Image (spheres, rainbow, N blue to C red):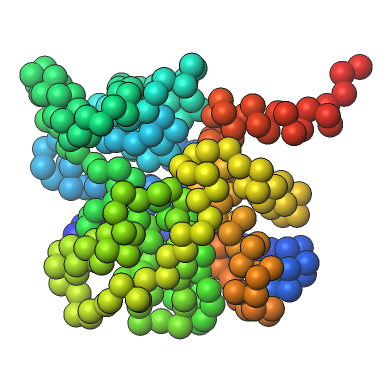
């Protein structure tokens, strides 16, 4: 893709399911793109990005992957998984307070053999921490390859440019909804869908320190230069919805839990409380407000992340709401 090879690890394209029960109730034609079903490390969207990163890392002679995220980073889990599959070492740097117990993804990272580095979010530049960790391992003979948060740079976004080609083959028109965190998934889709009749909306799931449209414009310019794209955009071309943060990154939310219950009890599909649950809660509200019209074709991208249900703060909130349905005889 654009001269960037990848190590093909996945069976693509991912499935598309028609959600008949929700379509009937909501009055739309609702489909779900199952990127949660990618096959390594319990699946998720980051694996598409990592196909490109792992090729680049091995070409550069790396023996170890280093990446960053929060304590509940799905990207960290999948980086640990892809490292294990390729017999490489891995360190996941989590810029977060210790949650009192290993979060589900942190536990999985350790099961995959990765070293987890917890660093309190105290204002220390993240790259300073990365350099310290890399220096430690390089002094032991490792060759480290750094993957940014979410795998989101010009290399990682290629995975979702590729996904956009799948979507264009699967749908002639429609409205694509995706959660938006570190923006690599959104940017790859945005670039890949620009010449199609598929409209893309990104549901922002965490606050940005700078104006998000400015950030998107800068990211696009980086991608455009790297990929040698032949089209231009303005900030107005990005459809990014900032109205559904629900308290911030990975914060428990009643609206999001209700959306998770709705998808599970209607279609037997599990969403997560950090990304896809927020995006689906946003979709429901957009339908209610008339921003998505009756009869419209909507394609919801399932990016995975279900281990987040077992994060201490989310698990407690779910348990408090659901315990009344448990009977002990």
Q: Residue at x 42, y 70 (%)?
A: 239
Q: Residue at x 46, y 76 (%)?
A: 199
* Percent x, y of residue 32: 58, 62
Q: How many marks?
A: 0
Pick the residue in front: 91 or 232.
232
Q: Is residue 311 above or below residue 212?
A: above
* Percent x, y of residue 262: 72, 52
Q: Is residue 285 above or below residue 329?
A: below
Looking at the rendered image, the quarter that the C terminus falls into is top right
Pick the residue in front: 154 or 252.
252
Q: Is residue 210 visible?
A: yes
Image-based side of 205 in relation to 215, left or right: right
* Percent x, y of residue 264: 70, 48
Image-based side of 288 in relation to 160, left or right: right
Please tell me in which quadrant of the rendered image residue 210 appears.
bottom left
Q: Is residue 277 above or below residue 65?
A: below
* Percent x, y of residue 14: 49, 58
Pick the residue in front: 184 or 99.
99
Image-based side of 180 in relation to 255, left or right: left
Please tell me in which quadrant of the rendered image residue 33 appears.
bottom right
């Amino acid at each position: 893709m654009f001269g960037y090879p990848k190590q093909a690890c996945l069976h693509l394209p991912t499935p598309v399911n028609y959600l008949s029960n929700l379509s009937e109730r909501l009055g739309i034609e609702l489909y779900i793109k199952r990127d949660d079903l990618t096959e390594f490390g319990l699946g998720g969207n980051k694996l598409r990005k990592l196909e490109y990163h792992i090729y680049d890392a091995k070409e550069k002679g790396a023996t170890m992957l280093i990446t960053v995220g929060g304590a509940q980073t799905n990207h960290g889990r999948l980086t640990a998984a892809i490292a294990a599959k390729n017999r490489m070492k891995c360190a996941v740097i989590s810029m977060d307070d210790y949650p009192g117990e290993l979060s589900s993804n942190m536990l999985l990272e350790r099961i995959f053999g990765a070293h987890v580095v917890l660093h309190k979010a105290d204002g220390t530049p993240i790259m300073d921490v990365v350099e310290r960790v890399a220096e430690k391992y390089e002094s032991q003979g490792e060759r480290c390859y750094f993957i940014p948060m979410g795998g989101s740079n010009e290399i990682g976004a290629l995975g979702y440019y590729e996904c956009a080609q799948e979507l264009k083959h699967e749908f002639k028109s429609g409205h694509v909804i995706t959660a938006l965190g570190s923006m690599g998934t959104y940017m790859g889709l945005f670039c890949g869908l620009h010449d199609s009749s598929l409209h893309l909306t990104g549901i922002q799931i965490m606050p940005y320190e700078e104006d998000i449209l400015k950030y998107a414009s800068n990211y696009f310019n980086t991608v455009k230069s790297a990929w040698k794209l032949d089209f231009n955009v303005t900030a107005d071309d990005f459809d990014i919805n900032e109205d559904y943060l629900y308290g911030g990154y990975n914060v428990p939310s009643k609206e999001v839990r209700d959306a998770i219950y709705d998808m599970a009890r209607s279609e037997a599909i599990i969403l997560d409380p950090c990304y896809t649950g927020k995006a689906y809660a946003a979709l429901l509200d957009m339908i209610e407000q008339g921003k998505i019209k009756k009869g419209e074709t909507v394609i919801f991208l399932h990016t995975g992340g279900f281990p987040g249900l077992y994060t201490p703060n989310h698990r407690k909130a779910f348990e408090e709401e659901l315990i009344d349905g448990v009977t002990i005889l």
